[in-house]
C-alpha cells in the first residue's frame, strides 16, 4: 500500500510540475512577443490612413479595444561602425504604451526622448551591438526608396542620434527593430500619414473579428492582420507539447495505478480465507467487492493528496529551486546565449490541478475493479477446503 501511495504521489507531482512549467513558457512567450506586437493591425492598402485621429477615436469606441496607436513601418539599412538591415517603426510616444510595452523594456533612455524633428532613434540591444553604437552615437538610416537629383538617382538617407536602447529578450526585436518618431518616419519616407493603426484588445483571440469590423467602418481599403498570423506557431507548438506531456505523464500515473492493482490482487490472495468466512457469515459478493474498492480508493486518495501537495509546492517554488541548484553546482539549465528564456518559468493553474486530480482519481477507481471482482468471485468452500 505504501509503495502504491508513493507511486501515485510521484506521478501526480511530476504531472503538476511539468504542466506548470509548460504554462510558464507559454506565459513568457506571450509576454515577450505580445509585449511588442499589437493584437491586431489595420493597415492602409498602398496608401496612408486618412484622418487617423478620427480613425483612432472610432477604434477606441469599440468595447473590445483597450488601446490604439498609429504607426509607420518600413525596411531600411542602418549604418554605424558597421551596417545592418532593420525594421524601422515610427511611433507616437504618447500613444505607443497603449499597444506595446516598449517603454517598460528600455535599458537606456526613455521612449519620450523621441520627438518630432529631433531625428532620435531607439535601437534593440543586439541591433546596437551589430552596428557598434551606443547612446549618443550617430547612425545613418538609408531607405530603399531613391531620389532623383542633378547628381543622378540616389537612395534617401538621414543621420539619426541614438537616444535609447531597449531589450525584449526576443531576437526578432532586439536584433532587428529600430524605433523613431512617427513624424520623422513620415518625413523620411515621404508619407502623408501613418501606415496603419495597431490595436490592443481585452481578448486577443477576438483580434481578427474586431479588426475586420473596424476596417469596414473606416471608409477606405484596409489590410487586416492579427498576432496569430505571424506568431501562432510558437503558441500552437507549446499547446501541442502541453497535451503530449499530459498524455505521457498520465501514463506514469497509470503505471502507479497498476501498482495499486498488483497490491490489491496480492491482498485478495492473502485474505482468501477471511473473505470466505465473511461470505459464510452472510456478506454478499457486492459488499465484498465494495470493501476492496474502498481500500483501493483510500490508498489512491492518499497518494493523490500527497502528489497534489508536493506538486503545488514544487511548481510554486520551482524557479527559486532551479536558481539555487544552478548557484550551488555551477550549472546553467537555460543559457542566455542560446535560449530566449534563460530561467525556468512556472505558472500554477488550479484548473490543471483539478484535471490532474480527477484523472488520477479515475485511474485509481478503475484500478480497484479487477481485484474487487476477483475477491467477489471467491467461493467459501474452495477457499476453506484445506483450512
Image (cartoon, rainbow, N blue to C red):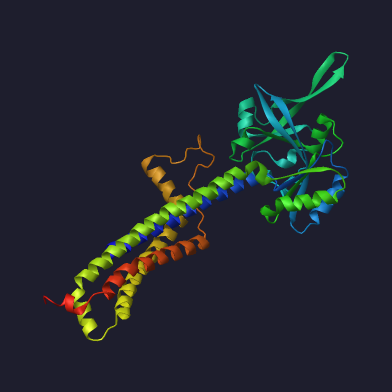
Above or below: residue 257 compared with residue 200 = below
Above or below: residue 340 compared with residue 217 = above
Above or below: residue 34 compared with residue 130 = below
Q: Which residue ends up furthest to the bottom in the rendered image? A: 282
Q: Position of residue 118 (x, y in %)?
A: 79, 33
Quadrant for residue 47, please give it. top right
Q: Which residue ends up furthest to the left in the rendered image? A: 386
Q: Position of residue 124 (x, y in %)?
A: 64, 35
Q: Is residue 117 at least partly visible in the picture?
A: no
| Left or right: 32, with 186 as reference point | left
Quadrant for residue 93, please give it. top right
Q: Position of residue 161 (x, y in %)?
A: 73, 29
| Left or right: 344, with 9 as reference point | right
Q: Residue placed at 23% from the left, 66% from the top?
A: 266
Depth check: give the residue in front, 167 or 26: 26
| Left or right: 329, with 316 as reference point | left
Number of numbered tags placed on the structure image: 0
Depth check: give the residue in front, 279 or 270: 279
Amino acid at each position: 500500500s505504501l509503495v502504491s501511495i508513493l507511486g501515485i504521489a510521484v506521478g501526480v507531482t511530476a504531472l503538476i510540475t511539468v504542466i506548470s512549467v509548460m504554462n510558464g513558457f507559454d506565459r513568457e512567450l506571450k509576454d515577450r512577443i505580445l509585449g511588442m506586437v499589437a493584437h491586431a493591425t489595420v493597415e492602409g492598402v498602398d496608401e496612408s490612413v486618412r484622418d487617423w485621429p478620427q480613425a483612432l477615436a472610432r477604434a477606441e469606441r469599440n468595447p473590445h479595444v483597450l488601446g490604439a496607436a498609429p504607426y509607420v513601418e518600413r525596411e531600411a539599412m542602418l549604418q554605424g561602425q558597421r551596417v545592418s538591415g532593420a525594421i524601422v517603426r515610427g511611433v507616437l510616444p504618447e500613444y505607443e504604451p497603449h499597444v506595446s510595452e516598449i517603454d517598460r523594456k528600455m535599458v537606456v533612455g526613455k521612449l519620450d526622448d523621441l520627438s518630432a524633428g529631433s531625428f532620435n532613434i531607439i535601437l534593440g540591444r543586439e541591433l546596437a551591438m551589430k552596428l557598434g553604437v551606443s547612446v549618443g552615437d550617430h547612425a545613418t538610416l538609408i531607405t530603399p526608396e531613391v531620389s532623383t537629383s542633378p547628381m543622378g538617382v540616389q537612395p534617401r538617407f538621414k543621420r539619426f542620434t541614438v537616444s535609447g536602447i531597449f531589450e525584449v529578450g526576443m531576437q526578432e526585436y532586439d536584433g532587428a527593430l529600430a524605433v523613431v518618431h512617427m513624424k520623422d518616419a513620415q518625413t523620411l519616407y515621404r508619407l502623408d500619414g501613418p501606415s496603419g493603426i495597431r490595436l490592443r484588445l481585452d481578448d486577443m483571440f477576438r483580434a481578427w473579428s474586431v479588426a475586420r469590423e473596424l476596417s469596414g467602418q473606416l471608409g477606405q481599403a484596409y489590410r487586416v492582420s492579427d498576432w496569430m498570423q505571424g506568431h501562432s506557431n510558437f503558441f500552437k507548438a507549446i499547446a501541442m507539447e502541453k497535451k503530449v506531456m499530459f498524455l505521457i505523464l498520465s501514463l506514469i500515473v497509470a503505471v502507479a495505478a497498476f501498482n495499486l492493482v498488483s497490491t490489491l490482487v496480492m491482498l485478495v490472495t492473502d485474505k482468501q480465507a477471511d473473505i470466505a468466512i465473511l461470505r459464510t457469515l452472510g456478506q454478499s459478493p457486492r459488499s465484498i467487492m465494495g470493501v476492496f474498492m474502498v481500500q483501493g480508493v483510500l490508498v489512491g486518495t492518499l497518494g493523490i493528496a500527497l502528489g497534489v501537495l508536493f506538486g503545488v509546492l514544487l511548481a510554486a517554488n520551482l524557479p527559486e529551486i532551479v536558481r539555487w541548484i544552478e548557484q550551488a553546482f555551477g550549472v546553467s539549465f537555460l543559457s542566455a546565449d542560446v535560449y530566449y528564456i534563460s530561467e525556468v518559468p512556472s505558472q500554477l493553474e488550479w484548473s490543471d490541478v483539478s484535471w490532474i486530480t480527477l484523472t488520477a482519481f479515475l485511474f485509481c477507481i478503475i484500478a480497484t475493479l479487477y481485484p474487487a471482482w476477483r475477491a467477489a468471485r471467491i467461493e467459501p468452500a474452495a477457499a476453506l477446503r484445506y483450512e
